[in-house]
Amino acid sequence: MKIYEKAPAKINLMLDVLHKRPDGFHEVEMVMTMIDLADRLEMSEQPRDTIIITSQAGYIPLDEKNLAFQAARLIKERYDVRQGVHIHLDKKIPVAAGLAGGSSDAAATLRGLNRLWNLNIPLAELLSLGAELGSDVPFCVTGGSALATGRGELLTAVPSPPQCWAIVAKPPINVSTAEVYGRLRSDNIQHHPSARDMVAALEEGNFREMCRSLGNVLEEVTLKLHPEVQQLKDAMIKLGADGVLMSGSGPTVFGLVAKESKVARIYNGLRGFCKEVYAVRLLT
C-alpha cells in the first residue's frame, strides 16, 4: 500500500516579534498562508522495522537530520508502531529559504503515516506532535491561512487571501533562522506590522490593503547580513509587483501580483538575479 501527500510551502504575510520568552523562544505574531509550490511524498510500508528516506534531490540529508525522518520516528515511538516505512521525497521547495519546506515535509509525514498505519490520531494530537518537531509544523499540518501566536504553534484560522499570484525568488545564499533570531533585538524594533490590519484585509478580501499590511521585522536583520536580499526586493518593486516581502527569516522574497499580465514580466526580469524563481498561485 502507498500513501501520497502534498507538502506546500508557506509564506508569511506578516511576521512580528514581541519579546524573548523565558524558555529562550521568541513570542511572535504571524499571518501565514500556503502557496502552490510543493514537495510530494510517497510513503509505503517496509517489512523491516526501519525508516528509509530517499529523494531525487542530492542536497538534503536523508537521515535523522531530516524533519520527515524525525516525524516518522516520533509517530513510531509514540504509538508503538513496529512497521517500517519508505518515504520518497520529491523535493521542489528550496531549502533554507524561509518557506517551511522541511516543516511541511514533517507535517505531510504525520498526516500520511496516520493514514498508512490506520492510527486514527485526532487533529489536535497531530498538532501537538507537530509542535514537538518545530514551530511551523502545526500550521503545515492544517494548511490554509492562519494567525499564529506563541512561538508559532498557537493557530487561529483566518480567511484565505483574495486570488492573486506570488512571484517567489530565492537568491543563492542560505540563511540561518537561529542566527537571525539571535541577532534580533526585540526591544529595538522600529516598526511593528499589525496582525489586526492584515486579518481585517483578509476578512474584507481587500488585495490592496493586504499588500499595504505586509511586514516582517526579521528583514532588518537579514537585509543587513545579506544586501542581495534588499536588491531582490528593489528589483521586484521596480518590475511592478503590488506588494513585496521577505518570507520568514529569508532569504526568499515574494511579490504579490493581482494581474496575470504582470506575472511573466516580473518572472523573466528576476531570472537575471537568481535561478530559483517561481510564479505560483496562493492556495485559496
Image (spheres, grey):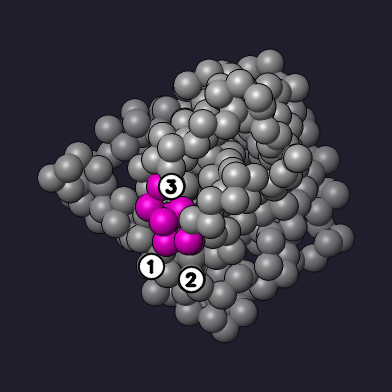
Question: Residue 160 or 275: which is nearer the viewer?
Answer: 160
Please tell me which of labels 2 and 3 falls first in the chain: 3
Q: Quadrant of residue 162?
A: bottom right
Element on which disc 2 rests: strand
Q: Can the viewer see residue 28 in this picture?
A: yes
Other residues around mark 3 within 10 Å, as few (<14) / some (14–19) / many (≥20): many
**Magenta-colored span:** 122-129
Q: Relative to 62, is 27 on the left or the right?
A: left
Residue 92 % position (x, y): 72, 35
Three-letter amino acid code at disc 1?
Ser
Left or right of residue 6, residue 123 in this image: left
- Cα separation between marks 3 and 1: 27 Å
Dividing the picture into quarters, in which one does residue 257 lie? bottom right
The x and y percentages for residue 248 are: 47, 45
Residue at position x 60%, y 70% from top? 160
Q: Find residue 194 and name its label.
A: 1
Q: Which residue is mark 3?
A: 130
Secondary element at tag 1: loop
Tell me the mark number nearer the camera, choosing from 2 and 1.
Answer: 2
How far from the left and from the top, in percent, is residue 45?
A: 67, 33
Residue plotted at (65% across, 24% down):
47
Residue at 47% x, 22% y is: 65
Specify the amino acid type for callout 3.
Gly
Q: Quadrant of the N terminus?
A: top right
Q: Which residue is mark 2?
A: 157
Kindly report which numbered mark, 3 or 1, lies closer to the viewer in this rendering: 3
Count residues near mark 2 (Cα–Cα under 10 Å), then give few for <14, some for 14-19, many for 20+. Answer: some
Residue 123 drawn in magenta? yes
The Cα atoms of the two marked residues, 2 and 1, are separated by 17 Å
Front: mark 2 or 3: 3
Q: Secondary structure at mark 3?
A: helix
